[in-house]
Amino acid sequence: MIQPNPELNLTKKDFQSDQEVRWCPGCGDYAILNAVQNVFPELGIPRENFVIVSGIGCASRFPYYMNTYGFHTIHGRAPAVATGIKVTRPDLSVWVVSGDGDALSIGGNHLIHAMRRNADIKVLLFNNRIYGLTKGQASPASELGKRTKSSPMGTTDEPFSPLALALGANARFVARSVDVFPPHLKGVLAQAAQHKGSAFIEIFQNCNIFNDGAWRGWTERDVRDERVLNLEHGKPLVFGAKANRGIRLNGFKPEIVEFEGEPPRDLLVWDEDNPEPAMSFLMAGLGDRPGFPMPIGVFRKHEETTFETRVHAQVDEARSKAGSPNIQTLLEQGDVWTVS
Amino acid sequence: MIQPNPELNLTKKDFQSDQEVRWCPGCGDYAILNAVQNVFPELGIPRENFVIVSGIGCASRFPYYMNTYGFHTIHGRAPAVATGIKVTRPDLSVWVVSGDGDALSIGGNHLIHAMRRNADIKVLLFNNRIYGLTKGQASPASELGKRTKSSPMGTTDEPFSPLALALGANARFVARSVDVFPPHLKGVLAQAAQHKGSAFIEIFQNCNIFNDGAWRGWTERDVRDERVLNLEHGKPLVFGAKANRGIRLNGFKPEIVEFEGEPPRDLLVWDEDNPEPAMSFLMAGLGDRPGFPMPIGVFRKHEETTFETRVHAQVDEARSKAGSPNIQTLLEQGDVWTVS
Amino acid sequence: MQTLDHVVVRFAGDSGDGMQLTGSQFTTSTALAGNDLATLPDFPAEIRAPAGTLPGVSGYQIHFSSSDVFTPGDNADVLVAMNPAALKANIGDLRAGGLLIVNTDSFKQKDLDKAGYQVSPLEDHSLDRFQVISIDLTRLTRQAVEEIGLDTRSADRCKNLFALGMMYWLFDRPLDSTLNWLQKKFGARADLLEANRRALQAGWSYCEATEVFHERYHVPRFPTTSGLYRNIAGNTSTALGLVAAAHRSKLPLFYASYPITPASDVLHELAQLKRFGVITFQAEDEIAAISAAIGASYAGTLGVTCTSGPGMALKTEALGLATIAELPLVVIDVQRGGPSTGLPTKTEQADLLQALYGRNSEAPIPVLAAATASDCFRMSYEAVRIAITHMTPVILLTDGYIANGAEPWLVPKVEELPEISVSFRTDPENFFAYERDPQTLARPWAIPGTKGLEHRIGGLEKADRTGHVSYDPLNHEHMVRTRAAKVERVVDLVPDQTVEGDEAGSLLVLGWGSTYGAIQGAVRRARSQGLRVGHAHLRYLNPFPKNLESVMSRFEKVLVPELNMGQLAFVLQGRFVRPVESLTKIQGKPFTEVEVLNRILELAPGSNGKGGAA
Amino acid sequence: MQTLDHVVVRFAGDSGDGMQLTGSQFTTSTALAGNDLATLPDFPAEIRAPAGTLPGVSGYQIHFSSSDVFTPGDNADVLVAMNPAALKANIGDLRAGGLLIVNTDSFKQKDLDKAGYQVSPLEDHSLDRFQVISIDLTRLTRQAVEEIGLDTRSADRCKNLFALGMMYWLFDRPLDSTLNWLQKKFGARADLLEANRRALQAGWSYCEATEVFHERYHVPRFPTTSGLYRNIAGNTSTALGLVAAAHRSKLPLFYASYPITPASDVLHELAQLKRFGVITFQAEDEIAAISAAIGASYAGTLGVTCTSGPGMALKTEALGLATIAELPLVVIDVQRGGPSTGLPTKTEQADLLQALYGRNSEAPIPVLAAATASDCFRMSYEAVRIAITHMTPVILLTDGYIANGAEPWLVPKVEELPEISVSFRTDPENFFAYERDPQTLARPWAIPGTKGLEHRIGGLEKADRTGHVSYDPLNHEHMVRTRAAKVERVVDLVPDQTVEGDEAGSLLVLGWGSTYGAIQGAVRRARSQGLRVGHAHLRYLNPFPKNLESVMSRFEKVLVPELNMGQLAFVLQGRFVRPVESLTKIQGKPFTEVEVLNRILELAPGSNGKGGAA
Ligand SMILES: Cc1ncc(C[n+]2csc(CCOP(=O)(O)OP(=O)(O)O)c2C)c(N)n1
Ligand SMILES: Cc1ncc(C[n+]2csc(CCOP(=O)(O)OP(=O)(O)O)c2C)c(N)n1
Ligand code: SF4
Ligand code: SF4
Ligand SMILES: [Mg+2]
Ligand SMILES: [Mg+2]
């Protein structure tokens, strides 16, 4: 489905900037950078048409390392800046890179409004469940009871489910991937790129300095097959190292079924295109149910007319109704009189 | 379940302030004020322990008309102010009154964080789908395509579903009522009051000046029985003037069933206490499905330890561990030396 | 027919009585009659109060003349009061001997009660010092529209047109402009159109037929610069200035804002102008609005945002980003009474210090201010010109008084407006994102989509020239000073400060913003008393015009009247280390001429001996 | 053993080398040895750079002396460089003849490459003007801990302790305090504890055994006020001041904030003090933080919030609410380099104008500033006292330099701190929410839960006394002036401005905030050259001390050194209309004594003829 434009002749190298990458050695951000630099050349978009907008945080240094247009703005406001870019320049491919503090804490409002509005911007949330840049405070994605610099006795509030929040705000494309699953991550990024409209991608990311192993329980090699479920459009929900377990619904309640051989007929078959995102919402909460695997992949993909399309349609309509409107006439509109 | 404290001997009159009520004649806010003034005396809470916090907007003038403690703060910030009050003074009954612009537009972030955190504050959203105070601009609750002063060719963005947003943020109590359904509204308010934890109540409210009849299609006498579905805990979902229609699930898809006599067994039986709010989320979107009724009532009611309880538990624990800590000792902590 | 030089008329009624409409129709016909004029609409507090009560009163005052008009007038010569509350709220401003027209039909006991009158003022002789014209307006209007068969409520709604018809007769005005307007407004509703028409006509005919007025007045044409005129309110004027600037710079206009009184009308105006390629964006809040505008500017569009005090406060952080990113951006603050929510529908000039200094660290931004409603056009145009020429955010201050008030405007020829030239950088050869134009110190505007210019900018300190992130101490000092120097360079676009009245003398009245009219009137009156007084009005508050210090030095004293606690006065002292006198007023209302005049008389040693000591 | 008056030591290494820890341990033992001292930690930019590179260098400088110390010192006498990058970044600050200790084990080719050295500086004679002590620190450390059987990485981590042991020997220090500290830190990990102990001991013994140093130094005790001392960094000091004030006022402390460098440590400190009833609240953003703090204050708790520049910008609107609601609130701004994100880990004093004037409309707020790390205690205490006494928000300015830097602090007796008395209103009789105390002009603090005092407040203008909403013009003017008068009344709590050095003379150096040390040192040096110079240091920036103008008038000239573009200088001119000289620096770094001294010498006519003209 991706259309790498052979004339552009872009490679990963074209997307590497001349700035030395300055994340801590071992940081999960490197893998994500790598995935993005691998996917961008494949999208058929000229390099100069990419804009990466970020807020503040470790994740938000991302634009500096991409040889595209990049704007490292202020804490939490990247979705709003990106909206201004996209609505005035629909020709650009606009990406937002954000951390869990940047997007969910200070920037929560812009995030939900960007999702609701459905401008065609792709928000990548690097979720390390901690404030990296400011050296280790809890974030709204940190587990309840987590001890950090700012919560020495443990946090006292439940975290957001970032996906549930995005779905509650009617994000049309919602997905999740993992820093250490490069092929999966690339696949999700490519799908996000092709989707027309607001997209929200949570990426599990390891901060090996302040929150090492936050996702280990799901993503380490020895557990991941058992603990992670990959949602694939049109396919039944199957997981397990031997692909021998599946999810089915009992009424509204998900259940795990074990099987041998072919998956049973009554397994839930994943349908990512949900006008009504209640099923996606159910999946967003699945990983929190004891014993259930953590779903990754595309939770929702539902195209609707984008915000910028609607905005420009009005401008075009007004223009075509008005013929070629004259600015002098505008100034002289209404009751006028002449003094001579 | 409500415990009117006979010793308090409170009546509606005790909650009426000496300020002249200054909403437009015919405004739906009057009915809501009336309902609140009817419910508060019944709650068994001394009048001086109520605090009503609001932002800015027509709705937000509410505190002036209630003879309780009241704080008319700034646009969008009431949930944050209320959190400061509740976490320092768990003994107070803290209510937030907000409009759809105040709560969903500028105040969206504080709203979702208040819900997530689960401090025991009750947020009443007066949803008139318009900016009343500033004289008629679109709000994030206005229908797509709505023509207003700020959108003369119609809005270009889908509105939020306030309930979906609150559920996405994990609000533990979520409900909806209508200005012109006084008994229902009182019932919902009373249930919210009894619930321990963050509560979000959307109230359909008519702004007869700038958005007259916004809810008419559901709430007018002649249509309401057919168009509105009242969610009642433990009861099957039945609606219609003759109570002859119900909702059942086909897989994950809601369907309408007509019946005569007793409701069929397979109707969905409403369970408001959902640790996982996916079903509540489905209901939040029901009214948007063509042909389906608009649910009102309690969408979710799930108690968990509140934020202020957790915070004070830590303070208490630290205190009891420390015995009676001495402030002078604190200052003299660490490596010290004496000069004599 | 008696000829008058100038007249002040005030219409007052309940919010539901259509007084704003009546006033603005009268204004239009006055303008068409060639008078100079100034208006002051006076809305009730934000929420509609119960009909007939004092908080519900809505007023509209117009001052028109055959000579220069600077303010809407201190006192009214004619007051139209549609109900007792309107009478009570406004009678204090009617000059003794003035004409008072009241609608007796609305002086029933219940109406009097609502207004808090024990006895009807029409009966207790309390109005004896005025010429009272009592008319049963409601009844007469009902009669006039009877045949059309409207319900009573709709019929009664026409009574403002009846009153307007009377005023047209009184001041010898044709009905055409209002008839045309009715046609446009009610074209689709033939019955309402006809009813309003008849009411208007009936008011006029009633005066013609009866002897309700003893006199009829004529205010001759004001001899003014030749050209095409229209009447314009400040917010409309601001909107048009932006559109004109976008047109001249060949940039699309992106206007992002969040509604707030009294700035919302700029959004409403621009939302109507999509046919000029204008995109308006109602953001989720003021922070998102300025952020989106910054995004638009970054991407090569003219980004503009507009708000009032509380919203301005919220934009503070992002203003810092625009400063260090060195992107063009126009931020308009339609000031209102504060602090906090304050007096949202009233006027004030107290955001000056915030505009100049209200940001973390050293983030200098050019600041402009419009003096009158029509001046908003010129200054919003200027704001765009400076923003683009110097790649900088610019703040434009207007206020509630000029935003809502209207005045005649000599419509400029678009092609004669100053040029605004935009050149996007396209050449990748030797491109550095922070290399500067030696003249303007502007960095290149290099927008996404341009091949070969891919680069990164942001809010961290940048290395000189390359724009890379730099923590180097000396580079930081250099960049802070360079940004300051760039804003100083804006002075090249700032015209020298002119002085009206005396070019040198005993007192310079130095104003800024919406106090223009009151100062102008006061200075004229002072000079007619023989005082040597000049009036300089600052439109550029940062940087100041080059010659400002020398202008000040030509006068013995400088008086700065402001609707705040003395903010400009403080800045001038801090900057020029010379004492200035301050006249302040913080009542949510503009100065009257007399208030300014009195202070002038205290300070200026007059040839006629009336002034104070030197 | 040679006795010295003062020494400056700098430790420098990779971020992973534990230099901050080494420095602070050395500081503690220095303090225990009874020297006066000042420190300057110098972190790398926020994100960890690759090991061994220049951006990854972390440094810690300490200046200690047997007499007064005011700054961390301009140049170092001793530099410990753990790798080539550390050498390169710091060698410029080592005085000629200074002692340079390098770890030769980290001067391999790959290390040199990372630091960008072509040739090893140890071999190209570029270090000839220093006393170079080359030691194979890594190897020696490995040997020392060999028996414990740690992996190499953990073993190598002990090398900073080896270096520290050497410094202890050099400056004749006992090892106890560090040994105690190790015990606390590694108590649970016997192997690490033992390894670190041995490394420390080994460093010391190595010097004792070999002749690596030719000399050993002793810096005698500093004769100082008697009492109990500890070493304290500004952010800790701020936190303790708040806790002490809460204790003395018998109010619970509610501290709401959002993390931001360099303010976060105040949150971290207070989060550890729950046993004192402190509630800390990490809000979703700075707006929520101040809003929650306002809510807490409204409900009868001591609400405090703290941030740095960009966060301060976001709090602007809510500051207006606190002003008009007249609630006690303390807002702390730990300033950092700007504008926008700027230089987040560097220091600056450029938020002064924002603190004073950065709000919409007239919203006056008392502003204080701490002069040194330990002074943060006193000033945060003062901020609380003023906030409660006058029912007003108060802004306290500190900055990154004193927030992170430590100095010895004479621990006060809590019961001797000034009283802070809180009286909540409880009597419903004649209760009016905006009736004022005639002395302080404070309104009553009437908190929810109090029977009979139910009332409403908010951001709209309030009627005098009752606090009801009022749109009355004259009431508005009255309230604006009253709020300003209330802030002026704070002067009653402000001590008279004192002057150190000459009480009158040719030049007053007038500083504020963290420039204290540099000015103090410079003034002392100037006076020792016979100049008549005084030093006044402002801790109260609004209102100014009563006698400030008269203090200034006792000097021919006034010099204001600031880490900004001259903000206080501007304010003083605006206020007193008298010219002041300005010395500015905007490099993210504090002044050196010499920089200030040079300017003094330029300005002050010296008895020895060295100064400039009068
Ligand atoms: C207005 C403002 N407040 C606070 C900060 C400080 N700050 C910078 S990044 C950050 C959070 C970083 O966490 P996250 O977004 O999760 O990104 P990460 O570093 O983990 O990638 C904070 C609090 C700031 N720069 N600006
Ligand atoms: C910071 C700020 N921005 C904007 C405003 C202007 N404003 C006041 S209320 C309001 C919205 C009102 O709409 P809503 O919240 O739906 O309340 P309603 O009036 O409809 O009850 C706006 C935009 C303000 N007071 N403060
Ligand atoms: S602090 Fe954490 S998130 Fe930031 S660069 Fe280091 S490892 Fe990555
Ligand atoms: S404008 Fe609308 S919401 Fe506001 S008071 Fe009037 S009717 Fe009610
Ligand atoms: Mg993070
Ligand atoms: Mg509304």
Image (cartoon, coloured by chain):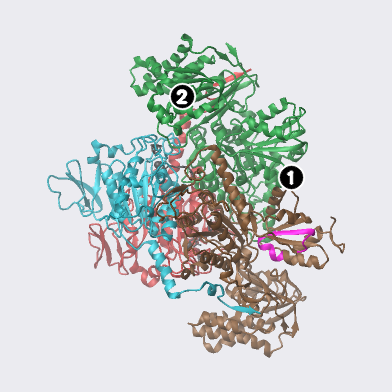
Chain colours: A red, B cyan, C green, D brown
Q: Amino acid at mark 1?
A: Phe
Give the magenta-colored segment's residue range.
D501-518
Q: Is residue D22 magenta?
A: no
Residue beneath disc 1:
C576
Q: Is residue A217 above or below residue D34?
A: above
* Secondary structure under the numbered disc 2 in the rendered image: loop
Residue A43 percent across, percent down from the top left: 46, 52
- Which of the two labelled residues, at mark 1 and mark 2, occupies the earlier sequence position? 2
Residue at 44% across / 64% down in the picture? A129
Task: Residue D30: name its quadrant.
Answer: bottom right
Q: What's the chain of the residue with tag 1? A: C
Residue beneath disc 2:
C121
Residue B140 percent across, percent down from the top left: 41, 44
Labels 1 & 2 near each other (Cβ < 8 A): no
Q: Amino acid at mark 2?
A: Pro
Q: Nearer the viewer, residue C318 or D538?
A: D538
Task: Residue B34: name its quadrant.
Answer: top left
| Quarter placement of the N terminus of chain D | bottom right
